[in-house]
Image: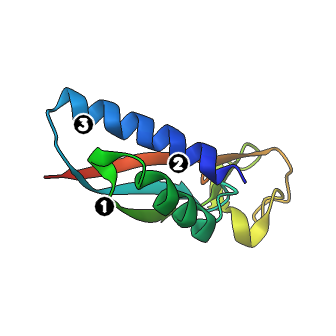
Amino acid sequence: MHELGIVFYIIRDVKEVAEQNDVRRVESVTLEVGEVSAVVPHYLEDCWNWAVRREPIMEHAKLKWETIPAVTWCDGCKREYPTVAHGKICPYCGSAETWLKTGSEVSIKEIEAE
C-alpha cells in the first residue's frame, strides 16, 4: 500500500507550507490524482484519516481530490488520445510509438487554512 507513503509526503509538504505562512490550522488539502497513477482513492482516504489525527495542525483536515485524465501522445501521427480507452496503441494510426503525457501524477493543488 503505497498510499500511506504518499500521505506522509503530502503531510510533510503541507506542514512545511503552513509553517512558512504562519498557519495555525489546515482545513483541507486538494490533490490532483492521475487516472492511471495506481493510487486507490479509498485507501488514500483511509491512510489520510489515520495520519492527520497525529498532526495537531492538520488533525481535522479534509482530503479532497480531482482526477487528472490519462492522455497519451503519439509520436507517429502527432496526436493525443485518452489512454484508458485505447491503451498504448494509437487509435488513429496504430503506432506503438506513444508515451503517457498526463495521468500518472499525484500533486497538491490547494491547501485551505484557517
Name the N-terminal-most of marks 2 and 1: 2
Of 9 and 90, which appears nearest the observer? 9
Judge by depth and name the residue closer to the eye, 109 or 62: 62
Q: CA distance from mark 2 to mark 3?
A: 16 Å
How many other residues sit within 10 Å of disc 2, few (<14), some (14-19) or many (≥20)?
Answer: many
Mark 2 or mark 3, which has the lower sequence index?
A: 2
- Amino acid residing under circle 3: Ala
Residue 60, which numbered label? 1
Residue that lies at the very extreme toward the top in this rendered image: 20
Q: Which amino acid, mark 2? A: Val
Q: CA distance from mark 2 to mark 1?
A: 15 Å
What amino acid type should be assigned to the residue bearing mark 1? His
Residue drawn at x 28%, y 33% as measured from the top left: 17
In the picture of the structure, the residue carrying the numbered disc 2 is 7
The dot on residue 18 is 3
How many C-alpha atoms fall within 10 Å of the one at disc 3: few (<14), some, or many (≥20)?
A: some
Of callouts 1 and 3, which one flags the residue occurring earlier in the amino acid sequence? 3
Q: Is residue 67 visible?
A: yes
